[in-house]
Image: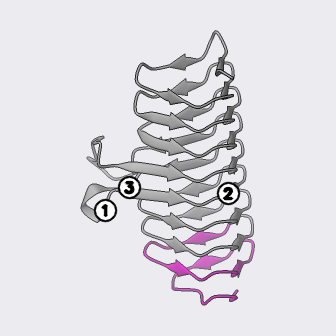
Amino acid sequence: MSAHIHSTAYVEDGAILGDGVQIGPFCHVGPHVTLGSGVVLKSHSVVTGHTEVGAGCILHPHAVIGGLPQVIGFEETPESRLVVGSNCVFREYATAHSGMPKFGGLTTIGDNCFVMIGAHVAHDNQIGDNVVMANNVSLAGHITVGDNVWFGGLAAVHQFSRIGRNAFIGGGAIVVEDVIPFGS
């Protein structure tokens, strides 16, 4: 089954599209992007940079993933990458940025993650499987998040923090240090 690309979408030469990919109106897919089978990009979503998106992921309108780190003077390089696992959902206006080469250059998001409206995954984060980020959660750079972590709406996490598996971060929390597994 081939990919379906809406006539108003722009898929740059070099992009790799898996079977059954659906690209909606006014989407943009960059030249160094790989979309796994069954990925759905709804209207106005963007996948850019050196980004791999696993099978079955869905990007809702205006989600942008693979953008450059928000670091003054940073320029795109092949060593700045984002890898997203399978069956992840990025809701409206969610963002995820690629990594910085001097720190390994890789941001990862595991399988079955749910990134809700306006949530942000910054550069060089390592996000486990089955992570839920409610509306407007903001993760600064260099954060490690274990599997099965839930973030309540508007939570913010300071750079270089580690969130243990099965933790629950309450809505509106400001996290400035590590959270133990099963902690809150």
Which residue is under mark 2? 136
* Residue to which mark 1 is pinned: 104
Disc 2, disc 3: CB below 8 Å?
no
Helix or strand or loop: what does disc 3 sit on?
loop
Q: Position of residue 129 (x, y in %)?
A: 64, 66
Q: Residue 70's x, y, as percent? A: 40, 51
Vertical position of residue 150 compared to residue 61: above or below: below
Identify the image quadrant of residue 75.
Answer: top left
Q: Secondary structure at mark 2?
A: loop
Q: Quadrant of the N terminus?
A: top right
Few, some or many residues within 10 Å of mark 2 (<14, 14–19, 20+): many
Q: Per the image, is 152 magenta?
A: no
Instruction: Measure the C-alpha gap from mark 2 to mark 3.
Output: 21 Å
Q: Nearer the viewer, residue 156 or 4?
A: 4
| Residue, disc 3 | 99
> Which is nearer the N-term, disc 1 or disc 2?
1
Q: Which mark is residue 50?
A: none
Q: Earlier in the sequence, mark 3 or mark 1?
A: 3
Q: What is the CA distance from the residue labelled 3 to the residue labelled 1?
A: 7 Å
Residues at marks 3 and 1 touching, judged by CB atoms closer than 8 Å: yes
Residue at 27 percent of width and 56 percent of height: 101
Magenta stretch: give its range: 155-184
Residue toward you, 64 or 10: 10
Eye-nearest disc, 2 or 3: 3
Query: Where, by quadrant of the figure, is residue 92 drawn?
Result: top right
Q: Earlier in the sequence, mark 2 or mark 3?
A: 3
Q: Nearer the viewer, residue 66 or 155?
A: 66
Q: Secondary structure at mark 1?
A: loop
Residue 14, image quadrant: top left
